Image (spheres, helix red, strand yellow):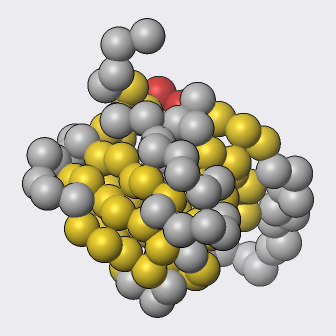
C-alpha cells in the first residue's frame, strides 16, 4: 500500500436498472482490486436477471429474500447471510419481506458499468 489517504464515499443513493437503490461506498480507480456498495431492495421487488464479469458477495444486513444463482432453485436468505456469486453466473434477488432488504455488495475486482450484462428482454 502506498501512503495513507482518505477516499470520500458518495452518500447519495440512486436507483439503477437492476430495480434497486444503490449507494457506492468504495468504488475508486485508485483501488482496482475491489468495490463496496450498499443496496436497498424494496418489499416485493425482484431484481433484473443479470450477470457480472467480476466475483461478487452479498452480505445481508437486514430483511429477508430469495436468491437465484446460475439457474439453481431460489434459496432463502436473511440477516447475517453471505452470498457468493462467481463471475459470469446469472443472478437475481427477491425481497420476500415487508421491510427493505439491505445488503452490502463486494465486487472483486472493482465493479464498473461494463461489468454488468442484463439477461432479460426489454
Q: Position of residue 55 (x, y in %)?
A: 32, 56
Can you say whether 43 is above or below 84 in the image? above
Quadrant assignment for the C terminus: top left
Extreme-bottom residue of the structure? 80
Extreme-top residue of the structure? 122
State the residue in front, 23 or 45: 45
Q: Position of residue 22 (x, y in %)?
A: 68, 51
Q: Position of residue 70 (x, y in %)?
A: 16, 48
Can you say whether 38 is above or below 109 in the image? below
Extreme-front residue of the structure? 98
Residue at the (35%, 35%) spot, across then down: 50
Q: Position of residue 62 (x, y in %)?
A: 60, 79
State the residue in front, 111 or 66: 66
Residue at the (22%, 59%) spot, across then down: 74
Q: Which quadrant of the view contains residue 94?
A: bottom left
Q: Which quadrant of the view contains residue 120?
A: top left
Extreme-left residue of the structure? 72
Residue at the (43%, 35%) spot, across then down: 48
Work out whether residue 53 can be spotted: no
State the residue in front, 69 or 44: 44
Residue at the (58%, 81%) spot, across then down: 61
Can you say whether 1 is above or below 108 in the image? below
User: In this rendering, would 46 be left or right of 39?
Assistant: left
Quadrant assignment for the N terminus: bottom right
State the residue in front, 15 or 33: 15
Q: Which quadrant of the view contains residue 25?
A: bottom right
Work out whether residue 118 can be spotted: yes
Number of marks in the rendered image: 0
Amino acid at each position: 500500500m502506498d501512503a495513507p489517504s482518505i477516499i470520500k464515499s458518495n452518500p447519495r443513493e440512486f436507483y439503477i436498472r437492476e430495480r434497486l437503490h444503490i449507494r457506492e461506498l468504495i468504488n475508486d480507480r485508485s483501488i482496482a482490486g475491489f468495490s463496496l456498495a450498499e443496496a436497498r431492495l424494496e418489499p416485493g421487488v425482484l431484481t433484473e436477471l443479470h450477470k457480472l464479469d467480476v466475483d461478487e458477495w452479498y452480505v445481508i444486513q437486514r430483511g429477508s429474500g430469495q436468491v437465484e444463482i446460475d439457474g439453481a432453485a431460489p434459496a432463502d436468505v436473511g440477516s447475517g447471510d453471505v452470498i457468493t456469486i462467481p463471475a459470469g453466473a446469472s443472478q437475481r434477488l427477491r425481497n420476500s419481506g415487508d421491510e427493505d432488504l439491505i445488503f452490502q455488495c463486494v465486487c472483486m475486482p472493482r465493479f464498473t458499468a461494463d461489468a454488468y450484462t442484463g439477461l432479460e428482454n426489454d
